[in-house]
Image (cartoon, rainbow, N blue to C red):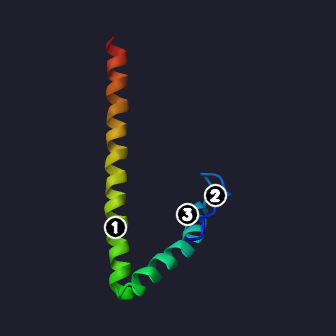
Amino acid sequence: MNSISRPFVTRDDPDRDIRCQDALDTAFCELLAGAMDAGWSERESVEAIIAIAESHLLSVAANDGTDGLVTMLRQMLDRSA
């Protein structure tokens, strides 16, 4: 798999999401081609990749929520100490 290029824009750049898509495109195409070479159809391969990505995104969101709660609890504990 080709290496994925590093970000060359700041985190607040309005086109950062597009730059990330550009960086991941080749790796995505290679993953898709590998799945198809293994015998999976293009549609089922893309659907599987989307399902995996959605599941991962839910996990990231849950972790973000937990991190926020932990931060809030620590602040409350610090104030009560």
Where does residue 68 sit, x and y in percent of width and height? 36, 38
Quadrant in the picture for residue 15: bottom right
Where does residue 12 sit, x and y in percent of width and height? 60, 52
Three-letter residue code for mark 3: Asp
Three-letter residue code for mark 2: Pro
Which sits in the foreground, 52 or 1? 1
Quadrant in the picture for residue 5: bottom right
Left or right: 30, with 7 as reference point: left
In the image, what residue occupies the spot 59% across and 61% down?
16
Question: Image height check: is 8 above or below 28?
Answer: above
First in sequence, mark 2 or 3: give its number: 2
How many residues crowd around disc 3 within 10 Å: few (fewer than 14), some, or many (20 or more)? few
How many residues crowd around disc 1 within 10 Å: few (fewer than 14), some, or many (20 or more)? few
Name the residue beneath numbered marker 3.
17
Name the residue beneath numbered marker 1.
52
First in sequence, mark 2 or 1: give its number: 2
Disc number placed over residue 24 in the picture, else none: none
How many residues crowd around disc 2 within 10 Å: few (fewer than 14), some, or many (20 or more)? few
